[in-house]
Image: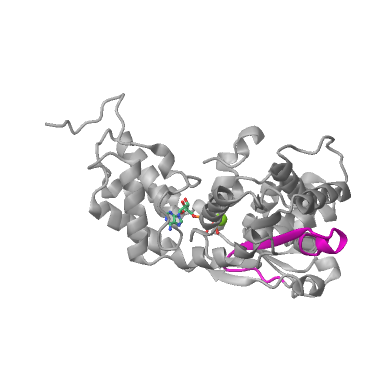
Amino acid sequence: MKREILLWDETIFKDRDVLEFDHMPEHFAHRESQMEALKFCVRPAFQGARPVNALCLGPPGTGKTTAIYKLFSEMEAHSSKVVPVHVNCQMDHTRHAIFLRIYSKLLGHSPPTSGVSFKRVLERIARTMAKENRVLVVALDDVNYLFPEKEVDRVLYTLLRAHETFPGFRAGVIAILSEPALTYVFDPRVGSVFQAEEVSFPLYSMEEIRDILKRRADLGFYPGVVSSEIIDKISDFTERAGDLRVGIDLLKRGGMEAERRASRSISSEDVGRAYERSRLVHLSSALKPLRDEELLLLAIAAEMETSKAGDLYKRFQASTGAGYTRFHEILNKLDAARLVDTDFSGPGHRGRSRIVRIRYDPKEVLERVRPQEAPPQTRKYMD
Ligand SMILES: Nc1ncnc2c1ncn2[C@@H]1O[C@H](COP(=O)(O)OP(=O)(O)OP(=O)(O)O)[C@@H](O)[C@H]1O
Ligand SMILES: [Mg+2]
């Protein structure tokens, strides 16, 4: 008979990687119509024509990024005439960074000198593409990170109008936006060239959630570790949270809790304990890329809960000595990351009286940003 107790060198995980968010699921179910719509958009590129632009919209964890990865890997396997480039705008949030990303993908290396001008980078990309008769498809993932300073207008304008300067250069854009969408009004010059086909990614139904999580659990754990009751419980939590990542994280953390008890199966209590951490996967992933100064402003905003931008600035300046421009930049970044809401409607000098509201429970934010007032080198977000 199998022992109930797990030995030191034993594990219930068959493949831990499967339970990470960046794992690419082999089986991408329940998104057939979205994949079809995206294929329709990129199809012209295979005939050497300009692709139809697309805008993917949907709440977090509904498979938008996964759909693009799947689409791009199929495209690459099919033909080298089309060059798909996935840009994570949270990381590359300036036009320059985005074109460097395209350059590296196209030429297989970064530009020879780091200080190379934007004009040069664009010219090299456009001429190479035109000469080789290839078509560019750029996915701007989490495009909201390009909203501050209207960077998105510059990026779209350049990509979609470069053919006027470089004949033979053809590019299409797939923009990806997590809902609830921030309101953004494109510059009219961009609006006229970025006419996008909307592809909507609705929330998964309870049945779909259960199906996806069951498959993931079967790949991630040995048989008998996750019962169907546990899958039901996790699916229930996931549906309430509205983000599939919560379910994937619950599987992983539930497994860790079971191992902590040296048990061979995940119990309902394990899932309950795991939920404490898993329910805020969003908050955690939004905090990860922030720098100390940005975390500090977020912490002050959390302490104040709702404040006038001017008052927030005074406190921020008192602790950092930073100027208004820097403050304004960071505030926009926190807004784009959907950590705070800023209401631009109020009157006031340079927006100082606009209202800033923290979007999460302030206590949850402070616990993550300043765990027990740890020393600065460890203060950065802890998982
Ligand atoms: N249909 C599906 N089948 C299997 N796994 C899926 C499916 N949809 C999403 N996932 C998984 O859920 C997680 C989140 O998916 P993804 O990153 O594609 O969401 P997203 O819509 O891009 O979210 P966000 O708006 O937060 O960026 C990933 O780990 C992915 O593997
Ligand atoms: Mg995504």
223 sits left or right of 109 in the view: left
The image quadrant of residue 136 is bottom right
Coordinates of residue 215 in the picture (x, y in percent):
33, 51
Q: Residue furthest left?
A: 1
Q: Residue furthest top?
A: 9
295 sits left or right of 9 in the view: right
Along the line of sight, the residue nearer the viewer: 182 or 375: 182
Coordinates of residue 24 in the picture (x, y in percent):
47, 47
Residue 314 shows up from this direction: no
Along the line of sight, the residue nearer the viewer: 75 or 131: 131
Q: Residue at x 50, y 63 (%)?
A: 35
Along the line of sight, the residue nearer the viewer: 269 or 256: 256
Question: Quick check: 158 above or below 97?
Answer: below
Q: Which residues are magenta?
A: 158-184
217 sits left or right of 382 in the view: left
Find out whether residue 178 is within the magenta segment.
Answer: yes
Coordinates of residue 115 in the picture (x, y in percent):
86, 39
Find out whether residue 231 is within the magenta segment.
Answer: no
Q: How is the image coloured?
A: one colour
Q: Residue at x 66, y 71 (%)?
A: 196
